[in-house]
Image: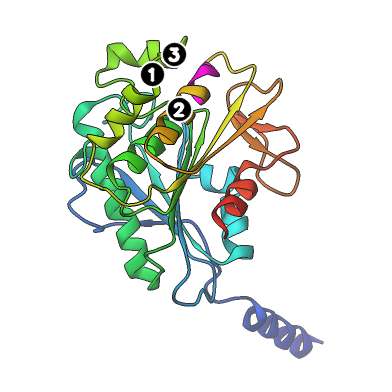
Amino acid sequence: MKIFLTVLLALTFLAAPANAATLRPVTGFGSNPGALQMYEYVPDGLPAGRPVVVALHGCAQDATYGQNAGWTGLADSLRFTLVVPQQVTANNLNKCFNWFQANDISRGSGEAESIAQMARRALADTNGDARRVYVTGLSAGGAMTSVMLATYPDLFAGGGVVAGIPFGCATAMFEAFTCMNPGKNLTAQQWGDKVRAASSFTAVRPGVSIWHGTADYTVAVMNQRESAEQWTNVGAPVQTRTIQGMGHGQPVAPGCGRAGPYMLDVGVCAAAELAKFWGL
């Protein structure tokens, strides 16, 4: 009996996967001028040539946003690499990405450059498809998604802004609160000019899906309209998704994501819908 149990235990360990995929920290991904932390999720057995998705958490969140929003599960089923940048309190006490600081939202500097370096590192780690790199985020992460699409349109093939803010709405902290609520009402041309000034890009812009809840009193829903005007003005394909009665947060659903603070079970999984929009 003792011998049988020993053999059974050995077989159990042999049957278990040796390197089960996990959201792991990655260091040495570049000069990291924004002093952010990088987390990467690579599904077991991922072949070369697969897409990369960058997911940016909201304030007071961390890299577990990648799991809670449903992105790690989708990475397994749809076969792509997931990158989750993580903010640190040394940069922002509330762990918000600094979407309102001029140095952090300019091409080649600050947090924007750190996030771009993470995407490039993920491509190198997995021999990924540089034509299929996507970025999305919630709240401050959504605002930072707008930053990445504006400043690195050559790197990203599509974006998803969830409860976010148009690019260039604020360049200093005192402006940020007005941008959040009630929001800024600029013309489509004014918003578009901000994007055009952010890089020398002249090709077709990446498509953008813009999500917002009608009961969001943290980031006013008018930001969805202003964001749509901004990206439409620069020629980007735009999709808008409005969730009636939803407050401030990421839409999740049973089987896709995990409900919790700012992760709202509304029966719709934004991550899955974004993956479909991008053609993953």
Q: Mark 1 points at which residue?
A: 187
Residue 208 position, x and y percent, is 48, 42
Between residues 1 and 189, which one lies in front from this camera angle? 189
Q: Which residue is drawn at 71% across and 88% down?
A: 7
Instruction: Using the rendered view, name the quadrant where residue 262 is placed.
Output: top right
48 left or right of 91 in image: right
Q: Residue at x 28, y 57 (%)?
A: 27
Q: Which mark is drawn over residue 183? A: 3
- Amino acid, disc 2: Glu
Residue 121 position, x and y percent, is 31, 62
Of badges 3 and 2, the one in the foreground is 2
- Amino acid, disc 3: Gly
Q: Which mark is drawn over residue 229? A: 2
Residue contact between numbered discs 3 and 1, judged by CB atoms under 8 Å = no
User: Tag 2 or tag 1, which sits nearer the N-term?
Assistant: 1
Q: Which residue is drawn at 72% across and 41% down?
A: 253
Report how far apart the C-alphas of labels 3 and 2 lie in the structure. Answer: 14 Å
Residue 207 position, x and y percent, is 47, 46
Q: What element carries label 1?
A: loop
**Magenta stretch bounds:** 219-224
Q: Residues within 10 Å of mark 1 (few under 14, many from 20)?
A: few
Report how far apart the C-alphas of labels 3 and 1 lie in the structure. Answer: 13 Å
User: Tag 2 or tag 3, which sits nearer the N-term?
Assistant: 3
Q: What element carries label 2?
A: helix
Residue contact between numbered discs 1 and 2, judged by CB atoms under 8 Å = yes
24 left or right of 148 in image: right
- Amino acid, disc 1: Thr
Q: What element carries label 3?
A: loop
Q: How crowded is mark 3: few (under 14 residues within 10 Å), some or many (20 or more)?
A: many
Q: Would you say residue 220 sits in the magenta stretch? A: yes
99 left or right of 13 in image: left
